Image (spheres, helix red, strand yellow):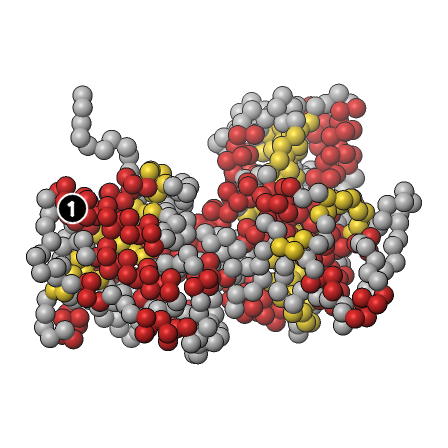
Amino acid sequence: MQTTQQTKERIIVPGPAGFHPPSAAQLGVTLPDPGTGLWYGHHEGEETVMEEIARVMLTSPNATIFPGPMVLWAWNEHAVEKAKTVLEIAAQIPDVLIIPMPDYRPKYPKIDAEEVINPNHPNLTIWGNKIEACIFIGVHCHYANLTLKMIRAGTNCCTSALCAEQGHEDAMLTVRDCSAEKLRHFAEVVKRVRENMGIKLPENGENVRFTGTQSKVHAGKSHTNPVDFMPTAAGLAGAAAFGHRAEHMQSEG
Amino acid sequence: MSESLETEVKTNPQGDPITSVAAPKPAAADVKKDPHAEAKKQRIVTPEHLFMDATRNREFITGSEAAKEAVRRSNVDFAVAYPITPQSETMQLIGVLYGEGYVKEYYRGEEEYGVMSAIAGASRAGVRCFTATAGPGTLRGIEPIASWPGHRLPAVIMFTCRVVNAPLAIQPDNIEISYLLNCGLILFHAENQQDMFDFIMKAFIISEKNDVTLPVGVACDGFFVTHARGYVHMQDRGMKLPPREAWRGAVPVLDAENPPARLSRDAPVQKSNFMAYNIHAVWQQEVWAAVERSRKYINQYMGGLCTAENTEDADAVLIAAGSAVAQSREAIRICADKGIKVGLIKVRSLRPFPTQELRQLCAKTKLIVIPEFNYVGWLAKEVAASIYGHSKAKIIAGPHVYGGQSMPVELIVDEVESGLTGKKSTNVALSQIMGTADTTDPAAMAHFMRSI
């Protein structure tokens, strides 16, 4: 009998997986080879994984992009280029949130979970914003792995990781070797999937939803157009003064 | 700076050059002009070329010299020394490399805690690091060593194993490996001088892979490997590995140019009142996940976590690591003379451990004998735990020698013969024998696990 349901048993799925579930590596999940990604714990073609990330981000409540330090700060031209692609991806997802992970230090005595995410207690941000789908990008692999494990353990969020290196087993969906070019392609995939699903963007282009503080500093606006925030060369000059050059992190992000 | 560091060519009775001094003799004028001249001429090649393709020449050298030659070709930035027998010569030779310009920074630490802490700082700053220690030095340094994996610090440390227990002794005994197994390090065990040479170079590359980003320990049995000579096939010393690309690590390097530089990575993480307990739990999971990820690189560069010889249809299989492998080879030859077919599994990687490989290799084995150079039988415990439920083999955790004893191969042969015939062994306690050829007895297994 034909079925439209995926019959492949999924290994890494949205949680809560439990008080302290085994890591994906303990469950036998291995990182994908070049040209492939991870689809709920299975190696799959990269395009298939990208399409699934798009579908999940377009259909889940409070979908959020979590940019990490490698795309938040203008270390060099490469980082700036990748930051632009993050905004291009955001521009394709209606009502998406952008919540930064600016660094990896635990926020104490208390994190503002609505405004930032931190690898030491990422579940607070997921719970606080009721996020059911997210994309991590520009986070160093160790901290991304900690974050993904904690989210899988304690929340019902479907996690995706767009990684410049080998990908992440504990993400439900991951694509590896993400160059700026590949990220631009992913933005196109999101656009294609969105159009196929008949989901429209607001006519004024203001599709990114502000968090509380973001709204306050933008005169109470609820949404914005991410393209208006494209980084300029000015920020890069500051980083360059410290000696950061593109070759220092040419594939990071 | 030293000069004329290695100019005299010595040979063994067969006429083979016996030290790395076999390298081309630099012109005296060149040495005086620039002691780093030869080092500066080294060219960077890919790990794949250096490990697999490059032509090798044979030399007859000690394990310490093999380590030195590996470091010479590994583009090492930083090495710290603190003497302890039988490691002292190794790090002294690394000092020679420093004099020759092959290692960029080198000094003698205060003691092992300081050495291992210095390695932590240097690795965190993004440079390629090497050190070596032994026995009591390993245990003195084990607190910082055990913190390296959690901080995701790539580095290579060589353990030239010796006795650690009182009464004080400097003799061979690899008990210290049992303390290292659960630190989160990747841990290799070298059989001989050739392994020492190859494992160290490959350890640097595996250690620095982004998805691994962990320290690697390369252990050998002191004196048997460090002080004895063996044939080592080495690539031309004019080649070296690519430098560490710290920006590709799983964690950011310490940025000393942008204050405030924090020497302790995310210090508040170490204060549980500021964090969820969960974070430390997943942190440990992540360290061991990284150990798991190293498997594919060990397979790629080292040809597997273990090697097997003649295990199919063998009457018995010896499983060994380190110098016990060399003794096992001779025991197998004697057994063959007696008409007993014995296979050999050499365990190269202790962490990660070749669990799946052993389950496959031992699925039909009837008798396993595990000779070791320590009292506790850590390898037998590892093997028994790995293959439990996957093999019906009778396992003999022995023979064991320790405290500096050598291992007469007759002890191994005796265990093979007694294991096959069922006659009581005179060398291994009955409590260290698990299972029978036909069935696995849970009670016997439990007794075995309690006793070894």
Up the image or down, B339 lies above or below B452; here it is above
Who is closer to the viewer here, B225 or A115? A115
Q: Quadrant of residue A109?
A: bottom left
The picture places residue A214, in percent across and down from the top left corner, at 17, 70
Q: Which residue is mark 1?
A: A194
Who is closer to the viewer here, B271 or B377? B271
Left/right placement of residue B32 relative to residue A7 reads right
Q: Quadrant of residue B286?
A: bottom left
Query: Mark 1 is on which residue type?
Result: Arg
**Residue at image location 72% in from the left, 57% down from the top:** B68
The picture places residue A147, in percent across and down from the top left corner, at 33, 57
Up the image or down, B255 lies above or below B52; here it is below
The picture places residue B56, in percent across and down from the top left corner, at 73, 44
**Residue at image location 84% in from the left, 67% down from the top:** B29
Q: Quadrant of the N terminus of chain B?
A: bottom right
Q: Quadrant of the C terminus of chain B?
A: top right
Label 1: state its secondary structure.
helix
Task: Report crowding for label 1: few under 14, some 14 to 19, many 20 or more residues within 10 A (C-alpha).
Answer: many
Left/right placement of residue B445 relative to residue B75 reads left
Who is closer to the viewer here, B236 or A3? B236
